[in-house]
Each structure stands twice: as C-alpha cells, then as structure tokens.
C-alpha cells in the first residue's frame, strides 16, 4: 500500500471522550483544556471546579448527566472535546454526538471489573464506525502494566489494540514512557510537558521487541511495510505515522496510550496523537455518506434549552461556512434562521461571527430542528445522514403537579426535556388516568425532575405508577365441584 500521499488532517477537529462510569473522562477534559491553555487552572471534580459537569444536577450528584462541550486550540488547530456521560442511564447523550465526531478517546483504567461496560461502548463505536484511541487512565494508582491491561481489554475490542507506549518504572510507579513510534523516552512532569530523555539501556531490548510487535500489526494492512520487516529494513518514521493515521481512519486498529489525567501525565502525547493521527472533517463527512454540494451542511449533535437564552442546537459543520443569521433547511421541509452563533466552554457560550467546516458550534433558536437531524443552507438538498433511535423507557414514575393550572406548563416543560434527551418520554395512561414519565432508571428520572424544577420552575410530585388491571376482583365467592373416580380402563 502506497502511503506516500498520506498527509496529516488539518483544520478543526471534534473528539468525543467516552468510557465507563468514574473512569476519569471529565478530569481528562480538564487536563486537555489546561494543557492547551484554554483554562488557567486545572479544576477538580471533587471540589466542583471543572469546566465539565458544571450543571447544577451534575454538581449535586458528582457525575456527568449530559454532554459537556469545550473548544480549545492546540498547535494552530481548534479541537472541540465532547465529554460523554459514563453511566448507562445517560447513554442516549452520546449516541447522536458520536456519529459527528472525527474520533473518540475511550478512557478506561486497570480494572477488569469494568470491561463489560467498556465492551458496550466499543460496540457502539463499531456500529457508528467511529475511529477510536484507548487512553488507560490513573496509571499513578496501579502497579498493573499497560501490557497486562491490554490482555483483558483485547477480547472486548473487535479491532486489534496497538500499544503505542511502554512504561518506565520508578519504585513500583510508572514515571514515564517510551514512545514506540517516535523511539523517544519521556519522564513525567506534574501538569507540565514531559521531559525528553535517553531510552534507558535496560529497556533497549524490550523497546525493540515491542516496536516490532507494533509494526507487525500495522504491516497486516500494508504489504510494503511487511516486506521491509521481512528484509530486516527499518521503515521510515513518516511511513509508520502514515500507517497509524490511515489504519485508524479506516477502522483497522485501535492505538493505546496511557497516563494520569489528574496529574497531567501523558496529556501532551495524547494531544499530539490526535493532531497527527486522528482523521479530519473531510474523512468524517465521507464516512457519514455526505456528498459534495452547494452551501453548508451540519449535523445536530445535542439540544439544550437554556433558562434565559432559549434553545441551543449544538452542531458539527460538515461542509461549507455558516454565519450568524443563516437560514437552514431540514429533510422534512422545515426551515429556520439562526439567532446567535457560539462556541461552548462548558455551560458558557462564546459568541462568534462565522464557522467553517470542522467547527462544532451552538446555533441559537433553531426551533424546528431536533437532535440527530442533518441541516443545510441549500433548500431541497438536505440528506438525513444518520438515524439514531431513542432508547425505549425501562423505568416509569407517575408524575403530577399540586395545582391543576400548572399541568400545561408541566407538559410543555417535559416536552423540552425530551428534546434535550430523547430517551425520556411521557405517557398519558387512559386506564389509570396518570401521566407517567419514562426513562432509563431511577437516577435518570431523578435528574430530569431536578432539571424540571431548576430550569423551568416546575415542581412535580411523583409516586409509583398504578398497575392497570384489566379485571377487577370485587368480592369473594364459592364454587362446588364434583370429582368422580374412574375404576379402570379407558372408559
């Protein structure tokens, strides 16, 4: 395979952060923002000072309950990071967003008990054909080597896992790493760029063996590289990076890196891997089946209803350029004009004048469009690129307001919640004469009710839903029966 024409993707990138509950995704977002200079201090989830999880419900429960979006600049390119909730009850949040991302960083840790949850996430990425890296987090809190972690992660992944780094140890703790593609060693520095050092002499043999193992996996999809390895030729570094980039974009491999988001270790190397190897918006548009055409096209990843600013539609611009006030058209014949164009830093919108292909922005007051829809500035040419079905409700509670005059406000506010999170639903049960709110679990509904009160000022009461028995037992009765014993034969 000729890789001489492969070039690093340039321009704005959109990267999803996914992983099991409590794997450290929000902390990783914070570390990425701090390393890029987007924030001046790295906050902590424990003291409620992070850019992500800034919503009152997330702060109250100490967990991600919706998408958190933040944009930063690194080495001349803009990167929008989308932190997705890890709890399975909030999995719908990630479904529509993932399809529009260029790549995902799957955050995990050295805990084999979380592999089943990780497997569900990897399966979802497979279904959407999203390229992914794995970032083994919290290496400062374990003595398990990344290679051992890979041994129990590989069965959960349909793609070959390629270890990009091997650890350097100091008194039982990982103190740095050797990058197998660069063939350089780095010592961790707390919340700073790692220091480049010589590869330790006692690691030279293991570095050579692990690098060869990495190249062998790449050569499975590059015949020329395989010939070089069989001839004991050292492949050029540019070819190695070209293969890493191409095979990631084509969904053939999953690179694995490690570090500690809490201490800022391995963050610079992760950013550079994203910059040099992650595909760009052109590849993402091609993956989604977008054909070249006139005007701009965007994919709506998430809907928010703000308390005072109205509706915000978070969208990925897949082609063209858009400006504030642009008119968009949808696949159902609807249209709408934007009233505000923003980038997001957590819950804080930052107004901008225009956005180009690759940017992830918030569009103000697009009332006629929903999460998952594809929109275009050219009428009659809007394709529906993806179809994300809402998860059916599995847990329901009867819901009511104290004053009947608030029922209209209750239903209209719940309709907005469902726009934000389609895995919520409202049922008017004609048998029990109840309104039943359905969701993905008790915590999911609890957060929805808190949002209902905090954002829309509607205090709702809940109770277990009634069972609609189709027959009513009215009174007891007696029935006399007679049994005649048969004396023999078949009668």
Image (cartoon, grey):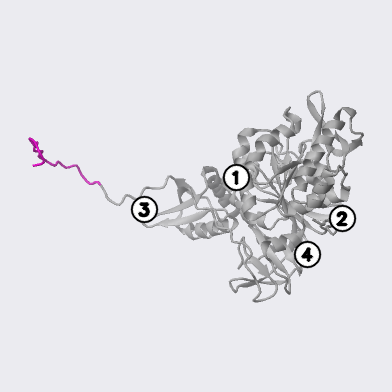
Start and end of the magenta stretch? 473-491
Residue at image mark 3? 432
Front of the two marks 2 and 3: 2
Residue at image mark 4? 355
Q: Which residue corresponds to the image point at 82% horizontal and 44% vertical from the top-left?
A: 230
Q: Position of residue 489 (x, y in %)?
A: 9, 38
Q: Earlier in the sequence, mark 1 or mark 2?
A: 2
Distance between mark 1 and mark 2 Cα atoms: 35 Å
Front of the two marks 4 and 2: 2
Front of the two marks 3 and 4: 4
Front of the two marks 1 and 4: 1
Instruction: Please name the predominant secondary structure of the magenta segment in the image.
Output: loop
The reply to whether dot 1 and dot 2 touch (C-beta < 8 Å) is no
Q: Position of residue 85 (x, y in %)?
A: 64, 46
Q: Residues within 10 Å of mark 1 (few under 14, many from 20)?
A: some
Along the line of sight, the residue nearer the viewer: 365 or 458: 365
Location of the C terminus (image quadrant): top left
Q: Earlier in the sequence, mark 1 or mark 4?
A: 1
**Would you say residue 479 sits in the magenta stretch?**
yes
Q: Is residue 174 visible?
A: yes
Q: Which residue corresponds to the image point at 82% horizontal and 39% vertical from the top-left?
A: 211
Q: Secondary structure at mark 2?
A: loop
Q: Earlier in the sequence, mark 3 or mark 1?
A: 1
Distance between mark 4 and mark 2 Cα atoms: 16 Å
Residue at image mark 1? 120
Residue at image mark 2? 76
- Looking at the image, residue 372 lies above or below residue 259: below
Considering every residue shown, the one lying at the far top of the view is 171
Q: Residues within 10 Å of mark 3 (few under 14, many from 20)?
A: some
């Amino acid at each position: 395979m000729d890789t001489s024409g492969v070039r690093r993707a340039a321009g704005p990138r959109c990267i999803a952060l996914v992983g099991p509950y409590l794997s450290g995704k929000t902390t990783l977002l914070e570390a990425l923002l701090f390393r890029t200079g987007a924030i001046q201090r790295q906050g902590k989830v424990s003291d409620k000072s992070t850019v992500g999880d800034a919503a009152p419900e997330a702060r109250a429960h100490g967990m991600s309950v919706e998408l958190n979006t933040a944009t930063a600049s690194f080495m001349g390119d803009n990167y929008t990071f989308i932190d997705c909730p890890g709890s399975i009850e909030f999995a719908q949040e990630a479904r529509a967003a993932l399809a529009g991302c260029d790549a995902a960083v799957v955050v995990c840790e050295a805990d084999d008990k979380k592999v089943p949850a990780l497997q569900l996430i990897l399966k979802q990425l497979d279904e959407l054909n999203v390229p992914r890296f794995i970032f083994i987090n919290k290496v400062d809190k374990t003595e398990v080597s990344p290679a051992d972690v890979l041994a129990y992660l590989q069965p959960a992944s349909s793609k070959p896992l390629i270890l990009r780094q091997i650890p350097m140890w100091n008194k039982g703790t990982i103190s740095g790493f050797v990058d197998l593609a660069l063939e350089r060693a780095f010592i961790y520095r707390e919340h700073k760029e790692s220091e480049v050092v010589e590869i330790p002499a006692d690691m030279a043999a293991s570095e050579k063996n692990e690098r060869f193992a990495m190249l062998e996996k790449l050569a499975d999809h590059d015949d020329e590289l395989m010939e070089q390895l069989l001839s004991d030729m050292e492949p050029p570094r540019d070819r190695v990076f070209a293969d890493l980039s191409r095979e990631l974009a084509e969904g053939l491999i999953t690179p694995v890196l490690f570090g500690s988001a809490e201490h800022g270790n391995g963050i610079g190397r992760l950013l550079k891997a994203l910059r040099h190897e992650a595909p760009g918006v052109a590849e993402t548009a091609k993956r989604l089946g977008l054909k070249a055409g006139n005007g701009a096209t965007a994919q709506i990843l998430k809907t928010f209803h703000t308390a005072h600013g109205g509706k915000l539609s978070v969208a990925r611009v897949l082609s063209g350029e858009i400006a504030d006030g642009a008119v968009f058209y949808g696949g159902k014949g609807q249209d709408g004009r934007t009233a505000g164009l923003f980038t997001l830093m957590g819950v804080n919108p930052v107004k901008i004048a225009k956005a180009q292909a690759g940017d992830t922005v918030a569009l103000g007051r697009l009332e006629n469009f929903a999460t998952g829809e594809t929109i275009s500035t050219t009428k009659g040419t809007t394709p529906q690129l993806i179809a994300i079905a809402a998860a059916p409700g599995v847990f329901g509670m009867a819901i009511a307001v104290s004053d009947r005059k608030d029922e209209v406000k209750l239903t209209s506010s719940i309709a907005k919640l469902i726009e934000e999170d389609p895995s919520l639903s409202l049922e008017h049960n004609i048998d029990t004469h109840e309104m039943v709110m359905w969701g993905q679990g008790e915590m999911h509904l609890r957060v929805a009710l808190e949002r209902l009160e905090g954002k829309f000022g509607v205090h709702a009461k809940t109770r277990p839903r009634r069972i609609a028995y189709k027959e009513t037992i009215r009174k007891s009765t007696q029935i006399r029966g007679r049994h005649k014993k048969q004396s023999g034969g078949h009668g």
